[in-house]
């Protein structure tokens, strides 16, 4: 079946929240990132997440993050004692493959239990954390006063406090937080191990995440961003997540990937032909065993002609069902077809 991982991107990319709840934003003219000094911000996030998870938040847990330590630098920012692994625990855990298998079984059991209890029962919940500009915080008298009162020396510490706190709220509601790679870049190995790191930057970034022992999702923008219109289906297809990793990386830590469709340049007129059929190329990579796509190993390559034929067939199926999927061999996602007639005729004449 299909499991839906919902994302609430905080503290950045959240200006729309200010329409309904202006109290959680730095000012009426500088809307994001969200205001950590407001007494409404974290209760609102807690309540919103509980609607998705079905968690009982009538008696909220006390956040244990030591604000005074946040001013001392990144390395001293601690996750709550209830969820942080000690060094001894890290060294006595099961081997990666066994631990992952156990975690997978536990996650499946938890998902089954939650399915009847929550709006989004999937155990992973995305919290964003990417592309945060500190300008509004640095221009906000109440945020600056809050930082001073709590011993936080600047926006870096405020960012770390915010993303750590929302992750703790998520874990308290029995979900595993997924956060964009910027969160890992800030915390490094001090990031709670019960975090999935979503990599959107270059592929080398994934290697660092895996080497540090974190589960990861891959959406490297060079190949799996659908709004990058010049990336062709075959470039997306050849973006094998496990290829090119260093010897210190464990590919078993890669939970999967995502082809991202951002909304800056789409509306109902061009959404479908931007997404399809290229997203199907990514889907085949993620849903097909590696030895099926690369029967002789990654270095030997794969049969793109066969893959293209499957994609052409799928594109025709989409168009028959009223989905305006673009021609497979377009060099730009939204280009017009090379000739008129049905996709079947176009396919035979290419």
Image (cartoon, helix red, strand yellow):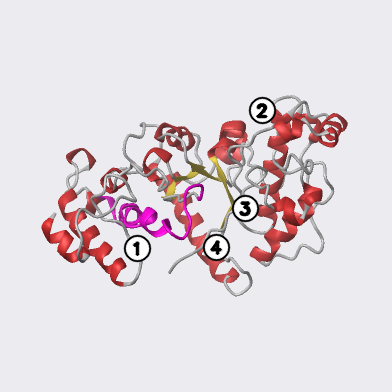
- Separation of residues labelled 4 and 1 (CA atoms): 30 Å
Q: Secondary structure at mark 4?
A: loop
**Residue at figure coordinates x 77%, y 26% from the top left:** 153
Dot 2, how many residues are within 10 Å of its Cα: few (below 14), some (14-19), or many (20+)?
Answer: some
Query: 202 left or right of 13?
Result: left
Of the image marks 2 and 1, the number of the one nearer the N terminus: 2
Q: Secondary structure at mark 3?
A: loop
Considering depth in this image, is 176 or 136 the residue closer to the camera?
A: 136
Identify residue for label 4.
122
Identify residue for label 1.
324
Identify residue for label 3.
8
Asked whether the residues under the numbered discs 3 and 4 touch, taking CB atoms below 8 Å apart as contact, a structural biologist would say: no
Identify residue for label 2.
75
Single out the mark in the foreground, 3 or 2.
Answer: 3
The quarter of the displayed image where residue 239 is located: top left
**Residue at figure coordinates x 15%, y 51% from the top left:** 305
- Separation of residues labelled 3 and 2 (CA atoms): 26 Å
Q: Quadrant of the N terminus?
A: bottom left
């Amino acid at each position: 079946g299909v499991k839906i991982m919902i994302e609430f991107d905080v503290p950045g990319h959240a200006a729309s929240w200010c329409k309904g709840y202006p109290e959680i934003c730095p000012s009426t003219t500088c809307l994001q990132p969200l205001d950590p000094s407001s007494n409404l911000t974290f209760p609102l996030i807690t309540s919103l997440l509980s609607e998705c998870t079905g968690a009982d938040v009538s008696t909220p847990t006390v956040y244990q993050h030591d604000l005074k330590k946040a001013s001392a630098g990144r390395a001293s920012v601690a996750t709550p004692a209830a969820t942080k692994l000690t060094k001894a625990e890290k060294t006595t855990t099961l081997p990666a493959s066994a631990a992952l298998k156990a975690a997978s079984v536990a996650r499946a059991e938890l998902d089954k239990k939650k399915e009847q209890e929550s709006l989004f029962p999937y155990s992973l919940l995305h919290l964003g954390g990417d592309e945060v500009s500190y300008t509004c915080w640095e221009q906000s008298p109440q945020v600056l006063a809050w930082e001073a009162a709590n011993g936080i020396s600047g926006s870096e510490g405020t960012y770390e406090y915010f993303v750590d706190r929302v992750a703790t709220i998520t874990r308290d509601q029995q979900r595993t937080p997924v956060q964009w790679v910027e969160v890992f870049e800030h915390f490094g190995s001090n990031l709670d191990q019960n975090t999935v790191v979503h990599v959107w930057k270059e592929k080398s970034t994934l290697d660092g995440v895996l080497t540090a022992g974190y589960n990861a999702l891959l959406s490297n923008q060079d190949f799996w961003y659908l709004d990058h219109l010049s990336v062709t289906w075959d470039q997306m297809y050849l973006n094998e997540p496990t290829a090119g990793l260093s010897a210190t990386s464990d590919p078993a830590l890669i939970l999967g990937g995502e082809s991202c469709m951002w909304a800056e340049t789409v509306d109902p007129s061009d959404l479908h032909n931007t997404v399809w059929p290229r997203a199907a190329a990514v889907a085949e990579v993620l849903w097909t065993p590696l030895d099926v796509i690369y029967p002789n190993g990654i270095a030997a390559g794969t049969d793109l002609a066969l893959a293209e034929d499957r994609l052409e067939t799928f594109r025709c199926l989409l168009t028959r069902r009223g989905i305006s999927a673009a021609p497979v061999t377009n060099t730009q996602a939204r280009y017009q077809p090379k000739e008129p007639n049905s996709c079947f005729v176009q396919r035979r004449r290419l």
